[in-house]
Image: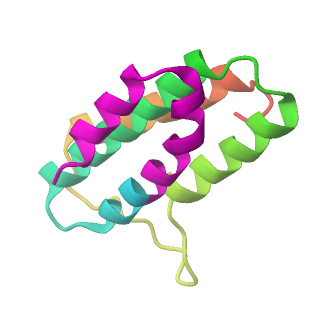
Amino acid sequence: TWYPLLAVVLCLVDSEFFSENWMSLLTQLGKHLKEKSTSLRTLTVESIAVLVESYRTKCANDDAKTIQANLTSIQNIVFLTGQKKQTFIVQGESVRTLELFADVILLMSKLDLDFA
């Protein structure tokens, strides 16, 4: 999949282009979180963490309402829940993937401590 490369390239562009396009890439990455391959899921979560970190640095001047809306979107994309209230994290998930989820939570809390 080409999403990890696209995430890195998007993080290298200017703030304006990044802020216009990062959420659509995050949404596309969210679709890959349901993959059966743990290595692909790990790559996906790592790409999401890179995007959230770049958002934290590139869009630090966003107003509180925008940050709150983006954090809610990140939460809904990354921490999938459905009618069955089941998550996609399965027994035997790689430690690296779980660490990356923890990193995403940490990055979200750095954006807005109240959200954590």
Residue 112 in which image quadrant: top right
Q: Position of residue 80 (x, y in %)?
A: 50, 64
Within the magenta stretch, is there residue 20? Answer: yes
For the point 22% across and 37% down, which residue is it? Answer: 5
Q: How many marks?
A: 0
Q: Is residue 97 above or below residue 10?
A: below
Q: Residue 47 location, x and y as percent?
A: 32, 38
Q: Is 12 positioned to the left or the right of 43 in the image?
A: right
Q: Is residue 115 left or right of residue 54?
A: right
Residue placed most toward the observer, 104 or 47 = 47
Quarter of the image with the N terminus is bottom left
User: Above or below — where is 39 with respect to 89?
Assistant: above
Whether residue 110 sits left or right of residue 10 in the image: it is: right
Q: What residue occupies the far bottom of the structure in this picture?
A: 83
Residue 101 in view (yes/no) = yes
Give the colour scheme shown: rainbow
What range of the chain is rendered magenta? 1-27
Residue 113 place in picture, x, y as percent: 75, 24
Question: Residue 50 versus residue 21: which sits nearer the camera?
Answer: 21
State left or right for residue 20 relative to residue 78. Answer: right
- Give the position of the C terminus as an image quadrant: top right
**Residue for point 65% across, 27% down:** 109
Residue at x 50% of width, y 20% of height? 14
Magenta segment: does it hold 79?
no
Residue 98 seen in this snapshot: no
Classified by dominant secondary structure, the portion drawn in magenta counts as helix
Give me the residue at 84% from left, 28% from top.
63
